[in-house]
Amino acid sequence: MARTFEDLVAEAETVSVDGWDFSWLDGRAREERPSWGYARTLAERLGRVGAALDIQTGGGEVLAGVAALPPLMVATESWPPNIARATALLHPRGVAVVADEDEPPLPFADEAFDLVVSRHPVTVWWEEIARVLRPGGGYLSQQVGPASVFELVEFFLGPQPPATRRARHPDDARAGAEAAGLEVVDLRPESLRTEFHDIGAVIYFLRKVIWMVPGFTVDGYRDRLRELHERIEREGPFRARTTRFLIEARKPGGVGP
């Protein structure tokens, strides 16, 4: 028997959205993964260096999945619930978790790290990344691209202006890195399939990824949520396109990690 709208809403409205683990969506939503395999690439790059920094680590889940970490590994995070989760997860691995407001400057000395990494950063302060990298050091990041999951965003907010749809374009990331004096050595965008199988998955996603529909609450969007629930019941999963890009950059000088 299909679950009712009210049952699905009640469940998704109360489940914890702390951290950056999306396993609650298993069987309820599906997102195609980028071809480059960020976790695998991250592990390979971290295995080469002595000192690394993970910016905006979330709950530390991605970093915790790396089998062998550098002798000096530091992570930053701004959201207090995530700081607590990351601390509990990463401290036993010898990782220092630093509370940081995601505003420059980074709380580290010049040329402190061989490698800076970040998965899905909300903001990227390129000059600070360049400053804390040693000569020859590298930056590795998987980022959300332009108009990602905008089929869902525009269902709730209506058509978005061209400038909003273009935001987070990989060409802008390249320009920002180069303006900070970094050399971009790899830039790969991909467009991927995403499906939401029930309205609970939609609610959980919008509660967790808070910048997709700013100010989202179930009460504020109940009518649209009910409409989308009925559409999913009638037509099947709600489909959208997720955009991602991988960017690697290097600070000139040195020999690199």
Image (cartoon, rainbow, N blue to C red):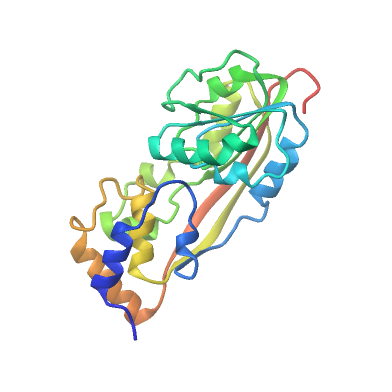
244 lies left or right of 71? left
Q: Residue at x 81, y 22 (%)?
A: 255
**Residue with the most extreme bottom position:** 1
Q: Residue at x 31, y 75 (%)?
A: 231
Quarter location, residue 233 = bottom left
**Residue with the most extreme top position:** 110
Q: Which percent across, then down, holds residue 252?
A: 72, 20
Compared with 29, 231 (above or below) is below
Q: Which percent across, then down, holds residue 62?
A: 58, 45
126 or 53: nearer the viewer: 53
Q: Which percent across, then down, holds residue 158?
A: 27, 56
Compared with 90, 157 (above or below) is below
81 lies left or right of 247? left
If the image is split into quadrants, where does the N terminus sit? bottom left
Compared with 254, 122 (above or below) is below
| Residue 155 shows up from this direction | yes
Q: Residue at x 48, y 48 (%)?
A: 20
156 lies left or right of 202? left
| Residue 122 shows up from this direction | no
Quarter location, residue 163 = top left
If the image is split into quadrants, where does the C terminus sit? top right
Total marks in image = 0
Q: Which percent across, then down, holds residue 190?
A: 59, 53
77 or 165: nearer the viewer: 77
Compared with 253, 216 (above or below) is below
